Image (cartoon, rainbow, N blue to C red):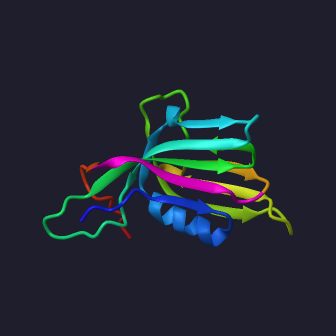
Amino acid sequence: MTTDPLKLMALDEEDLAVISAHMQDAVFLSPDVSFSKVAGQLQLLTNRFVWEKKRGFFKKPERRRAALVFKRVTAVRSIGLERDDRDAVNNLLSIQFEKAGEGPEGSIVLTLSGGGEIVADVECIEALMSDLSGSWEARARPHHPR
């Protein structure tokens, strides 16, 4: 069974949770993260795990190249992201929104394995996720011990 490329948009926390579920275990290199203050945009180019594809005993896990874009971003900071190590692989675990008051502004927190985080301060939630390529066989299925 082949799945069509995904194109998702988030304008609220519920939508963002859907994108987070599809982007769980996406991997990326530090050079694949870019922020344009002028455009107010944070972009990650990732190899996301295709969680939505049905799995069978003989079916292999897959990944796809995908872009994750956050708009209306005013500032970005990170912890545990090795910007100087261009070959370090980062694993995205979740995406969450933290409100900063009564209005729509707040911070989008991208949690990485190993305790890293990328935090984007935003005027409001406006996120886009889009597959950029077809699938290829993944080396393994992500595993999260309990």
Name which residue lies at 80% across and 59% down: 105
Q: In x, y percent, where is residue 36?
A: 69, 35
Q: Would residue 25 be found to the left or right of residue 96 on screen? A: left
Residue 131 falls within the magenta-colored stretch: yes
Question: Where 73 falls versus 98 (above or below)?
Answer: above
Question: For residue 111, what is the image quadrant?
Answer: bottom right
Quadrant location, the N terminus? bottom left
| Residue at the outermost left position | 58
Majority secondary structure of the magenta segment?
strand
- Of residues 144 and 7, which is closer to you in this image? 7
Name which residue lies at 36% across and 49% down: 64
Question: Where 103 falls versus 64 (above or below)?
Answer: below
Name which residue lies at 45% across and 42% down: 28
Q: Would residue 94 be found to the left or right of residue 63 on screen? A: right
| Residue at the outermost front position | 4
| Residue at the outermost right position | 102
Magenta stretch? 124-135
Q: Would residue 73 be found to the left or right of residue 43 on screen? A: right
Question: For residue 108, what is the image quadrant?
Answer: bottom right
Name which residue lies at 45% across and 62% down: 22
Q: In x, y percent, where is residue 68?
A: 54, 49
All told, the count of numbered labels is 0
Q: In x, y percent, where is residue 20?
A: 52, 62
Quadrant location, the C terminus? bottom left
Q: In x, y percent, where is residue 31?
A: 51, 31
Question: Where 90 falls versus 34 (above or below)?
Answer: below
Question: Where 92 falls versus 57 (above or below)?
Answer: above
Q: Would residue 51 be found to the left or right of residue 1 on screen? A: right
- Of residues 116 and 42, which is closer to you in this image? 42
Q: Would residue 28 be seen by someone viewing this image from the given angle?
A: yes
Residue 59 falls within the magenta-colored stretch: no
Q: Would residue 79 be seen by someone viewing this image from the given angle?
A: no
